[in-house]
Amino acid sequence: MAPAITQAVSQVAEAQASAATPGQLGVSIAIVVFVLAMFVGLEVISKVPAMLHTPLMSGSNAISGITIIGALLAAGLGGWLGGIFGTLAVATATVNVVGGYLVTDRMLRMFRRKE
């Protein structure tokens, strides 16, 4: 499957390189990479056993914390449009982190021994 994806990406890049400006080519490649990442992510996540969910959720919360730092930088340094998108990114990443910790805490409480 991987060689077919690699071949498809190279064909798209070759076809667009001849007809697109450098800026358009970068956007097109970014879209292709984003779509492929969605499929890879779906495959990886669907194969995670239930027992590994909590440790992976903790790792995901750490990544979302890094996203908050990037969003704060975008909100502070990106002009008015960067400020709007940065503020939205801070809000969504914060909801993601808080929700992740709540879900992780709930799952850990399920595995505690009853006293």
Image (cartoon, rainbow, N blue to C red):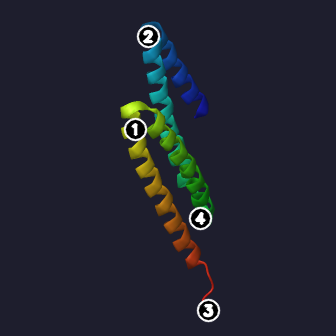
Quarter the C terminus occupies: bottom right
**In this image, 69 relative to 83: left or right?**
right
Q: Which residue is mark 4?
A: 54
Question: Within 10 angstroms of label 1, few (less than 14), some, or many (20 or more) residues?
Answer: some
Q: Which residue is mark 2?
A: 21
Mark pair 1, 2: CA separation: 29 Å
Q: Is residue 37 visible?
A: yes
- Residue 14 image label: none
Q: Amino acid at mark 2?
A: Thr
Q: Which residue is mark 1?
A: 83
Label 1 close to label 3 by CB (< 8 Å): no
Circle nearer the N terminus (2, 3): 2
Question: Within 10 angstroms of label 2, few (less than 14), some, or many (20 or more) residues?
Answer: few
Q: Amino acid at mark 4?
A: Thr
Label 4 close to label 3 by CB (< 8 Å): no
Mark pair 1, 3: CA separation: 50 Å
Residue at image point 46% right, 17% down: 25
Circle nearer the N terminus (1, 4): 4
Q: Amino acid at mark 3?
A: Glu
Q: Secondary structure at mark 1?
A: helix
Q: Which residue is mark 3?
A: 115
At which x and y percent is residue 16?
A: 45, 14
Quarter the N terminus occupies: top right
Q: Secondary structure at mark 2?
A: loop
Between residues 65 and 77, which one lies in front from this camera angle?
77
At which x and y percent is residue 66?
A: 57, 47
Q: Is residue 49 visible?
A: no
Question: Within 10 angstroms of label 4, few (less than 14), some, or many (20 or more) residues?
Answer: some
